[in-house]
Image (cartoon, helix red, strand yellow):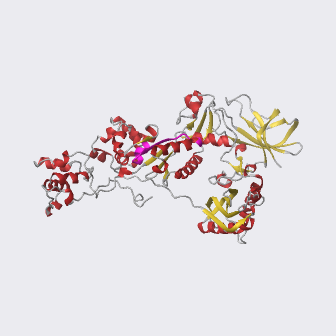
């Protein structure tokens, strides 16, 4: 970004200074004259009118090119005053718009080229791609929807093509869409993962231009000024971008316009890969609906009720009226500011975030070698020192060797926690360097932290030892380096009060954005609620021979063995999760029992008599105590 792009956005459109006349541009029949000294104290419009009258027709035409547009505080004020005083109309008002601009005029705000990308199905396409990567690909004819929590229950967040053809709409309640499409499969939408994926895609898009930023939940914006010729023109660049995104399984709509607002609107409401020239900006945005101005729903509804349905209708309204009505409104509720951003009157630079830090060290050798192992400890030490200075830790390191014949080989290792222990990182490559084909030798070795996270320096014990699980994490790192990261699973606590859902097995190499188990754990249970160390998933149903009313069974058969209850404690009632399970789910009453042999179990009754949600209650064994 340039220094000019980093200036704060002003609330009023920038005004272009007047062009000074030169003897070369003034005709001999109308010599340029200097305005009177008292003209500086007159209103701006009257002083400009006297200057044009004295300077002549040619000088007035040169000044009319750089004349600023009237502001909301004084719209066409000078013209009304001049006509009321009986002064003749300025010759510059009848000049055509194609007069050449003066050399001192500032660069036009619409000279920039902004590229906008819109991903209408980003959430569902990312979910389907992750499911395919996990080996859980769904058939194309299965209706699928992603849901999020709403004020009155879960609502539809995204749908696939089959669900959309069945009438399932985003924003509707899940219960209503299930009635419309009984075979609809509903999964939880991970909006945090969608945002992280969009951030990574934003950095990946910088191969076309150096400035990119996220634009909402499913959009990107790029400042492609001066970069299109590197790709054969703007049309060729858009085709290349959409082609590469299609390989990633993403549907994208793109557009290029002089302003961010115009590019945003054309990418969502324009044609296929539309390119808008600066001179055609006003004519192209005029027929667009007012929601193309990026206004909230309430403001769009109010404008439509007033009869302002398109951008052209809004632009035809006097600016003073809009300024009085929306003077204190926020940006998303101010159509005048949004219109100025779309037309280029108000600057809206692309706020491109900085690139993430990159950590890499290299070792250039005087002659080719066959084994990089002797150079690995020094590279790890230097890399960890660089990470320590910046306050980062490595999550994935990559060793790259460049052979003398031009071939490149890489070996990577991942860690479950950020670390900058040189000895531990060096040990992760044990038994893996042998996979590199040395060929005729290599003379350049690089070690890079391809994934790094912030790591604060802390001391957990007075004897400089660590009790934060570092030993277990290092053991998992070595197992992952030897057997592969996909072969390791670790239990993590979930936000659920259902016993079989409180724990889930996930990849041991937890993602950077995931929370630690202790961060997602719910509050501790009271002392009277004791949980067994061994749980059965799913719970195993038992056959009850005799049950005490509103109490535990006196005898039951489990795994072909009859158990007689001698002691019990309870019940502990757990209600179902109404936001995740069908409406017919039943509550549970848990009991801790002891049989005639001294074995203790954790059993529960699903449902009660007369609840209207099923037949007779059923009994299950949830776990066993040690």
Image quadrant of residue 153? top right
Pick the residue in front: 123 or 227. 227
Q: x, y percentage for residue 449?
A: 64, 60
Image quadrant of residue 14? bottom left
The residue sitting at 19% across, 45% down in the picture is 94
Q: Is residue 522 left or right of residue 25?
A: right
Image position of 457 with respect to 476: above or below: below
Q: x, y percentage for residue 299?
A: 39, 41
Does the magenta run of residues contain 379?
A: no
**Residue 516 visible in the picture:** yes
Does the magenta run of residues contain 250?
A: yes
- Name the outermost residue toward the left: 86
Q: Which residues are magenta?
A: 247-265
- Name the outermost residue toward the bottom: 463
* Tally of numbered tags: 0
Image position of 233 with respect to 456: above or below: above
Q: x, y percentage for residue 250?
A: 56, 41
Q: Is residue 419 left or right of residue 532?
A: left
Q: Is residue 83 left or right of residue 288?
A: left
Pick the residue in front: 563 or 107. 107
- Name the outermost residue toward the right: 597
Task: Name the image quarter holding the N terminus.
Answer: bottom left
Q: x, y percentage for residue 235?
A: 46, 43
**Residue 223 visible in the picture:** no
Pick the residue in front: 618 or 414. 414
């Amino acid at each position: 970004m340039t220094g000019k792009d980093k200036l704060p956005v002003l609330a009023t459109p920038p005004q272009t200074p007047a062009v000074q006349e030169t003897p070369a541009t003034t005709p001999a029949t109308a010599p340029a004259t200097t305005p009177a000294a008292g003209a500086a104290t007159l209103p701006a419009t009257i002083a400009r009118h006297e200057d044009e009258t004295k300077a002549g027709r040619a000088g007035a035409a040169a000044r009319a090119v750089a004349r600023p547009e009237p502001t909301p505080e004084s719209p066409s004020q000078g013209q009304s005053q001049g006509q009321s005083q009986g002064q003749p109309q300025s010759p510059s008002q009848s000049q055509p718009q194609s007069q050449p601009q003066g050399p001192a005029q500032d660069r036009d705000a619409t000279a920039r080229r902004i590229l906008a990308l819109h991903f209408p199905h980003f959430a569902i396409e990312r979910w389907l791609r992750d499911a395919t990567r996990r080996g859980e690909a769904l058939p194309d004819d299965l209706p699928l929807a992603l849901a999020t929590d709403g004020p009155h229950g879960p609502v539809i967040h995204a749908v696939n093509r089959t669900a959309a053809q069945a009438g399932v709409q985003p924003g509707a309640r899940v219960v209503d869409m299930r009635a419309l499409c009984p075979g609809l499969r509903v999964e939880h939408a991970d909006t945090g993962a969608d945002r992280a994926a969009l951030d990574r895609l934003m950095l990946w898009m910088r191969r076309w231009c150096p400035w990119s930023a996220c634009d909402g939940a499913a959009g990107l914006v790029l400042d492609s000024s001066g970069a299109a010729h590197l790709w054969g023109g703007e049309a060729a660049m858009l085709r290349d971008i959409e082609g590469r995104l299609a390989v990633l399984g993403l549907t994208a709509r793109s557009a290029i316009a002089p302003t961010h607002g115009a590019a945003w609107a054309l990418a969502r409401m324009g044609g296929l890969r539309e390119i808008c020239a600066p001179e055609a900006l006003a004519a192209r945005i005029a027929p667009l609906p007012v929601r193309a101005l990026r206004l909230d729903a309430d403001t769009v509804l109010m404008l439509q009720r007033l009869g302002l349905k398109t951008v052209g209708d809004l632009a035809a309204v006097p600016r003073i009226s809009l300024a009085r009505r929306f003077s204190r409104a926020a940006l998303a509720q101010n159509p005048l500011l949004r219109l100025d951003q779309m037309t280029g009157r108000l600057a809206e630079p692309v706020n491109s975030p900085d690139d993430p830090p990159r950590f890499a060290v290299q070792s250039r050798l005087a002659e080719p070698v066959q084994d990089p192992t002797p150079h690995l400890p020094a590279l790890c030490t230097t890399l960890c020192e660089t990470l320590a200075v910046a306050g980062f830790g490595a999550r994935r390191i990559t060793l790259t060797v460049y052979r003398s014949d031009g071939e490149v080989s890489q070996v990577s290792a991942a860690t479950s926690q950020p670390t900058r222990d040189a000895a531990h990182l060096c040990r992760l490559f044990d038994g893996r360097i042998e996979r590199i084909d040395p060929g005729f030798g290599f003379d350049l070795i690089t070690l890079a932290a391809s994934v790094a996270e912030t790591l604060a320096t802390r001391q957990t014990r007075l004897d400089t030892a660590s009790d934060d699980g570092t030993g277990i994490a290092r053991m998992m790192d070595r197992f992952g380096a030897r057997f592969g990261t996909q072969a390791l699973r670790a239990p993590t606590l979930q936000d659920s009060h259902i016993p079989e859902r409180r724990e889930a097995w996930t990849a041991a190499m937890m993602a950077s954005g995931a929370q630690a188990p202790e961060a997602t754990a719910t509050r501790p249970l009271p002392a009277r609620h004791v949980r067994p160390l061994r749980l059965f998933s799913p719970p195993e149903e038992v056959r009850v021979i005799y049950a005490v009313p509103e109490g535990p069974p006196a005898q039951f058969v489990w795994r072909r063995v009859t158990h007689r209850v001698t002691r019990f404690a309870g019940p502990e009632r757990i209600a179902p999760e109404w936001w995740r399970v069908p409406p017919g789910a039943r509550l549970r009453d848990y009991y801790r029992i002891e049989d005639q042999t001294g074995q203790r179990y954790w059993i529960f009754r699903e449902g009660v008599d007369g609840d209207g949600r099923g037949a007779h209650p059923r009994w299950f064994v949830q776990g066993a105590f040690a």
